[in-house]
Image (spheres, grey):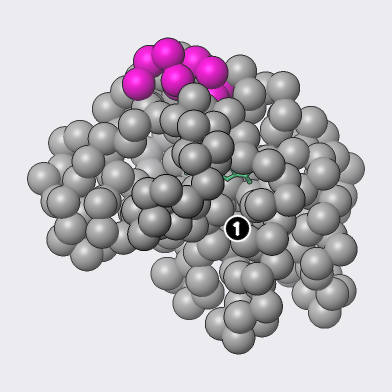
Amino acid sequence: MSVRLVMLGPPGAGKGTQAGRFAQARQVPRISTGDVLRQARQANPDLDKQARATMDAGRLVDDDVVIWIVRRRLAEPDAREGFVLDGFPRTLNQAEALDHLLDDRQPLVVVDIEVPDTTLLERLQTRRICAKCGMPATAVLAVCSACGGPLIARGDDDARVVRERLRVYEQESRPIVEFYRRRSTFRSVDGDQPQDAVAADISSAVASVLGAR
Ligand code: AMP
């Protein structure tokens, strides 16, 4: 059964990894605004210097830009029946825009991955990303497990920028958790456990929402 899922959680919670796993298992696209922005930067280094500086500093790109990206992506045929959103929404404005972009043919399931700050800091400093497909990985791997591409550190994972990203998360994105928490389609899962256990909890959480309808 297809599903529309929003994966929430602070930087380093494992959103990208879990969104990738879930999307692959359910055969729906994973839509990561961070990946779209990084690819746009690679394709055209001069493109929007402001967005580049914003990302490098760990701050949020303008709502208008990311909402435009998501609106365009959700209109593509492969996203009609389902998708996993990773890294969007990140502000209340974006969450409200997402509600307007969706029809009510299917519920929007929201899963928040909870991880304590100490674990987040440790993970962010050792994480890598595939230079080819954008899949997140850890420093213990040699190449990307999805496509075999080379792994690189993300520029915005250095200690100072990491602290800024966590601060921005608390200020801008934490309120979204409260925005969705009131809905019957919201679940939270413990992200401070092995990857497979988190994936299993996410599957059960989604099943409990869809089964209850
Ligand atoms: P991510 O890969 O999701 O951690 O995103 C990397 C960076 O892209 C973020 O730190 C932001 O600068 C930018 N970005 C990604 N998604 C959004 C969003 N929904 N709203 C604003 N900025 C975003």
Q: What are the residue bounds of the magenta stretch?
A: 158-166
Q: What amino acid type should be assigned to the residue bearing mark 1?
A: Leu
Q: Left or right: 48 with respect to 103?
A: left
Extreme residue in the left direction: 142
* Residue underneath mark 1: 85
Location of residue 197 in the rendering, given as x and y in whole percent from the top left corner = 43, 45
Q: Is residue 144 above or below residue 78?
A: above
Q: Is residue 38 visible?
A: no
The foreground one among 40 and 71 is 40
Quadrant holding the N terminus: bottom right
Q: Nearer the viewer, residue 80 or 38?
A: 38
139 to 129, vertically: above or below:
above
Q: Position of residue 18 (x, y in %)?
A: 46, 51
90 relative to 197 in the view: left or right: right
Relative to 177, say whether 210 is above or below: below
**What element does badge 1 sit on?**
strand
Query: In the image, what residue occupies the spot 37% across and 49% down?
Result: 45
Q: Is residue 42 visible?
A: yes
The quarter of the image holding the C terminus is bottom right
